Amino acid sequence: MATDYLNLMDPLTFSEQVPHEYFAHLRATEPVSWRDHDAPSIPYWAVTSHEACVRVNREWEEFSSFPKTSLINDNTEEMIAQQQLMMLNMDPPDHTRYRRLVNKAFTPRMIRDLEVRLHTVTDELLDNVCEVGAADFVVDIAAELPLIVIAELMGVPFEDRHKMFNWSNSMIGSEDPEYRHSAEIGEIAAMELYAYASDLFSKKRSHPTEDLMTALTKVNADGETLSDLELELFFLLLAVAGNETTRNLIAGAMNTFFQNPDQWQLLVNDRSLLPNAVEEMLRYVTPVMCFRRTAMTDVSLEGAEIKKGDKVVFYHVSANRDESIFENPNVFDITRSPNPHMAFGGGGPHFCLGANLARMEIMVMFEHLLDRMPDITQAGPTQRLQSPFINGIKHIPVSFTPSAKVLG
């Protein structure tokens, strides 16, 4: 039943699907609800309506990322102190300073400059499977494009990209049995990534190249140079955010098209719908389901009286199905317009830095799939990630008519 209490911090709650019926129930009855039975979390406020989620995301002076970070798990004070050095967990003015340092890598012009490379990489990926006529869509196709792009952007050698993939899976998917082989694997993966980043930055300083990581080793913002730890944490942020989110969006969107073949046929028949379809993919899938904030003052939100210091978790995945904003929100409609989704946040200082890059990667991937594999079909069950944070898919077996490679 949609009204049965669900533990929104339990990975098993999301193992088969996102509990959209339950979120709809919360939006209708208690859009800002007190949750004190969601182990292992401390008690917190779950924010589920679109309007309230936008406010929590934008109003950083009321709802801060810094005191307990943006991550939904409850960490030790030592871990929090380290995580506070990451841009994701900062508020202005520190957040503004960091964002200014790296914006040059994510401007619309820079993304346009990457477009040719994106097309080539996508053709290479499809060439690897096109003659076989079958693939694991996630591992062979969806995961590789963002992985290669973010590795090149950061100056990571091509042969090392799968290290980033494995570290990212171990950290983000640490509650999933496929990736969690021991209780400490997420921490071990983070330490290995930090060590790799430290070595990479050392090489960039002695042998600079044209990439974002080299640029960051030279940056001096407001008279302060980024410390080694700050550089390593930023590397971790880009490695995870630039890999996990776009991969799971592409995989989740393809899975959604399999469930809605009429929408795929619309795209096959009319390619001009693709830009609009990308926005609907982002709304419908919402790869990052939620973030955390800490109330900095007593505040009233949708009738709830939130106290200073309270933990607040706002659910993009619920906001993007809000009936007061989206007509027929549970219908996947690639012609939907307007589409004020929150997949990249609801504006404000925390709007996703890589939004332009993600949109371009999604667009390019589906352009090539439509061109080269228009008859792609699901050939086995979808395997979902067990996570209360990432709306992820691990495996989708697919089949398609074999074809010749397009690159020499």
Image (tube, helix red, strand yellow):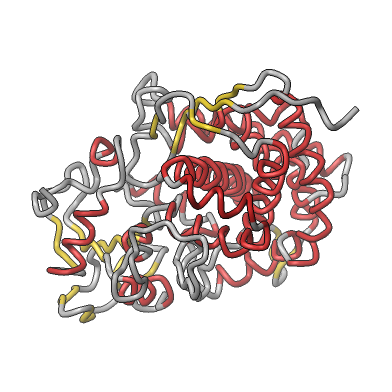
Residue depicted at x 36% and y 62%: 67
Left or right: where 86 falls relative to 35: right
In this rendering, the answer to whether 179 lies above or below 100 is: above
- Residue at left offset 23%, top offset 40%: 13
242 vs 56, left or right, is: right
Residue 324 found in image quarter:
bottom left
Of residues 272 and 302, which is closer to you in this image? 272
- Residue 246, image x, y percentages: 57, 47
Q: In the image, 280: left or right of 212?
A: left
Residue 283 lies, in percent from the top left, at 45, 60
Residue 65's place in the image compared with 182, above or below, is below
Seen at 45% across and 67% down, the residue is 341
- Residue nearest the viewer, comparing 365 with 231: 365
What residue is shown at x 29% (from left), y 36% (from top)? 16
Determine whether, in the image, residue 75 is placed left or right of residue 392: left
Measured as percent of width and height from the top left, residue 320 is found at 38, 64
> Which of the image's four quarters has the C terminus?
top right
Check the image and report above or below for 59 versus 106: below
Q: Position of residue 200 (x, y in %)?
A: 74, 36
Numbered label tally: 0
| Residue closest to the eye, 259 or 147 | 259
Q: Is residue 365 above or below residue 51?
A: above
